[in-house]
Image (cartoon, rainbow, N blue to C red):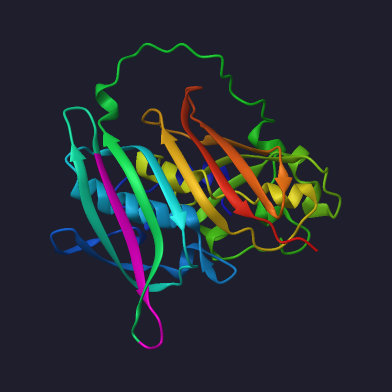
Amino acid sequence: MPEAASVQAVRATIGDSEFDRDTAVTLRETGVYDVELSAGWTIITAVNGGYLLAVLGRALADALPHPDPFTVSAHYLTASQPGPAVVRTDVVRTGRTLSTGQASLFQYDDQGREIERIRVLASYGDLDTLPDDIRTTARPPAFPPMDQCFGPQDAPAPIPGSSAITDRLFLKLDPSTLGWALGAPSGKGEMRSWFGLADGRDADPLSLLLTVDALPPTAFEIGLSGWVPTVELTVHVRCRPAPGPLRVSITTRNLAGGFLEEDAEVWDSADRLVAQSRQLARARLG
């Protein structure tokens, strides 16, 4: 994993990045897009949910008259695999400031039968037209300096559940949320990290859909291990992020009945809250 200075030296641009290539959609006909899901964004054997959300988000940005996701709610029905997929979109409503659409991603089983993997309902607008009035009690999370945080490359042994996606991310995790990596989880459902893409591409509204679901699960710090599959994920994009590294803070307050919530906040280099999310995930107990 490159250090921050290296990331800057090899910086990719928005539209010319591995993320952009791997989330590209090809219009086949009105409302139908062909996609190739990249193995580079997998966790264990399944494709990361945030990456999938960005793929569907790109298709909806093409299908709707407004450019930016404001709110996106996704239900994950079956685990997606690398390879060909089809996204079908439907415009639900268009208005002056917001347009709403839905999208589903499909793949095929060994018998050629179509399987729906994920279904999304989203509202899009134009972030550049929003007023500057901000009234908030939200404050950026306290983070150690980046050089006092640790990434996957600093681990003494392979991180449980690590996979190809870590090579595409710039992560520097707050050491107070890394007890799980040393075999001593704190029991607190917290995960915090500096965040970026490994090729240095700056964040934009579409990449924020990946960001909220790209850190190690808070379940690790609670003391669980293994895959934590997302059941439902809702993301609110609040403003266009400033260039530079992001800070991501994720918390879980309640694990019950084998399910837990993860509440995420994403802050940019200008100390603005640029995205919020909540997801319900299944925890593997025992």
Q: Is residue 180 left or right of residue 33?
A: right
Residue located at (19% from left, 50% from top): 63
Asked where in the image residue 264 lies, by quadrant, the reply is top right
| Residue lying at 51% horizontally and 14% vertically, measured from the top left | 136
Q: State which quarter of the image contains the N terminus.
A: bottom right
Secondary structure, magenta segment, majority class: strand
Furthest toward the bottom, the residue is 111
Between 120 and 203, the one lying in front of the other is 120
In the picture as drawn, the residue positioned furthest to the front comes out as: 257
Vertical order, 169 against 246 (above or below): below
Residue 118, image x, y percentages: 41, 60
Q: Is residue 110 magenta?
A: yes
- Above or below — where is 85 with respect to 190? below
User: Could you tell me if residue 13 is visible in this image?
Assistant: no
Is 274 positioned to the left or the right of 127 in the image?
Answer: right
Q: Quadrant of residue 247?
A: top right
Q: Nearer the viewer, residue 189 or 157?
A: 189
Q: Nearer the viewer, residue 261 or 156?
A: 261
**x, y (%) of residue 52?**
42, 57
Q: Determine whether, in the image, residue 28 is placed left or right of residue 103.
A: left
Q: What residue sits 59% from the left and 65% below the top?
A: 163
Q: Residue at x 29, y 21 (%)?
A: 130
Residue 227 x %, y %: 65, 62
- Outermost residue toward the left? 29
Query: Residue 86: where, in percent of width, then height?
Result: 29, 68
Locate residue 23: give its quadrant: bottom left
Q: Which residues are magenta?
A: 100-111
- Is residue 52 within the magenta segment? no
Side (left or right) of 219 relative to 66: right
- Classify the position of the C terminus by image quarter: bottom right
Q: Is residue 192 above or below residue 78?
A: above
